Amino acid sequence: MITIPITLRMLIAKYLCLLKPFWLRKNNKTSVLLIIIILAMILGVVKIQVWLNDWNNDFFNALS
């Protein structure tokens, strides 16, 4: 069995070739909007986690 080594450059080129039709279509407003919503939710969760960790730090420092 002969294996063909796939370099990182080839892998990225194939990946971009796969994604190109999706991002360059005419009606991709929905997908862009969904990505913006997902990123906003991720940033919100990170902000809540940082706030919770800060609150826990003060709480556990008060206990000790």
Image (cartoon, grey):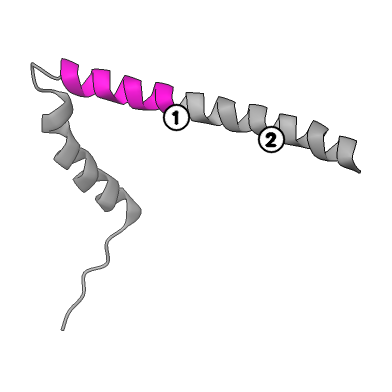
Q: Which residue is drawn at 15% across and 41% down?
A: 18
Residue 46 vs residue 22, the one in the foreground = 46
Considering the whole magenta stretch, tell me its main secondary structure: helix
56 with respect to 20 (left or right): right
Residue 12 position, x and y percent, is 28, 46
Query: CA gap, disc 1 to disc 2?
Result: 16 Å
Determine whether the residue tagged by mark 2 lies in a helix, strand or loop. helix
Q: Which residue is at 88% across, 40% downward?
A: 63
Q: Which residue in the structure is indicated by mark 2?
A: 53
Above or below: residue 9 compared with residue 47: below
Crowdedness of circle 2 by 10 Å Cα count: few (<14), some, many (20+)? few
Q: Mark 1 points at which residue?
A: 42
Residue 42 lies, in percent from the top left, at 44, 29
How far from the left and from the top, in percent, is residue 53? 69, 35
Q: Which residue lies furthest to the left in this view?
A: 26
- Report if the CB atoms under discs 1 and 2 are less than 8 Å apart: no
Indicate whether 8 appears above or below 29. below
Q: Give the range drawn in magenta.
A: 29-41
Total marks in image: 2
Marks 1, 2: nearer the viewer: 2
Inspect the image, locate mark 1, and give the three-letter code of the amino acid beneath it.
Ile
Give the class, few, some or many, for how many residues have Cα within 10 Å of label 1's Cα (few <14, many ≥20): few
